Image (spheres, rainbow, N blue to C red):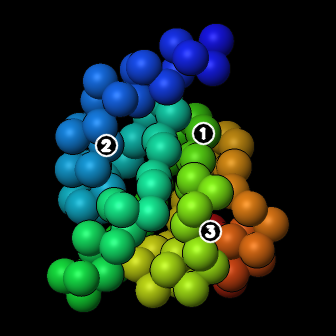
Amino acid sequence: MVTAVRNLLATHAVNIREAVAKDSMVVGVHAVGRKTLEGLQAKRKQVDVNVVGVLVLSQDVAPQLARATIRSVKIRGAFRASPEVKEALKDRMQ
């Protein structure tokens, strides 16, 4: 199952990056990696993440990077990230 999810995410990587950049709502599994957030940081942009399903911030996302790029988080479902990232975003959760 994990391989199937990874393959699906890889297939839709461009759509996922665009969804993050547009601050839109995502339904399903929304995975965000360090490179995506670094791209936003380079552009000096912050996003509002709105997910119905599962939000996954990869293990290579540092708490400082998450705080620098994620303005707010609204999840109706599960949030998977390191304990440090969850703590860093705690005050931004709605």
Q: Name the residue under label 3.
A: 94
Q: Is residue 3 left or right of residue 71?
A: right
Residue at image coords 34%, 73%: 38
**Image marks 2 and 3: residues in contact by CB distance under 8 Å:** no
- Residue 14 visible in rendering: yes
Looking at the image, tell me whether mark 2 or mark 3 is earlier in sequence order: 2
Q: Which residue is drawn at 57% across and 62% down?
A: 60
User: Where is residue 27 shown, x and y percent of the image?
Assistant: 44, 34
Q: Residues within 10 Å of mark 1 (few under 14, many from 20)?
A: some
- Expressed as whole percent of the image width and height from the top left, the position of residue 66 reads 53, 75
Q: Which of 40 and 54 is in front in this view?
A: 40
Q: Vertically, is 25 above or below 5?
A: below
**Nearest the camera: 20 or 10?**
10
Q: What residue type is labelled 2?
A: Ile
Residue assigned mark 2: 16
Please tell me how crowded label 3 is: few (under 14), some (14-19), or many (20+) other residues with Cα within 10 Å: few
Direction from residue 30 to residue 84 in the image, left or right: right
- Looking at the image, residue 72 sits to the left or right of residue 12; the answer is right
Q: In which quarter of the image is residue 3?
A: top right
Seen in the picture, residue 62 relative to 81 is either above or below; the reply is below
Q: Which amino acid does label 3 sit on?
A: Gln
Q: Quadrant of residue 13?
A: top left
Query: Given contact means CB atoms under 8 Å apart, are the residues at marks 1 and 3 in contact?
Result: no
28 up-or-down from 19: above or below = above
Cα distance in 3D space between marks 1 and 3: 15 Å
Q: Which amino acid type is marked by label 1? A: Val
Q: Is residue 71 visible?
A: no
Residue 54 tag number: 1
Q: Where is residue 64 in the image (x, y as percent from the top left)?
A: 56, 86
Q: What element carries label 2?
A: helix
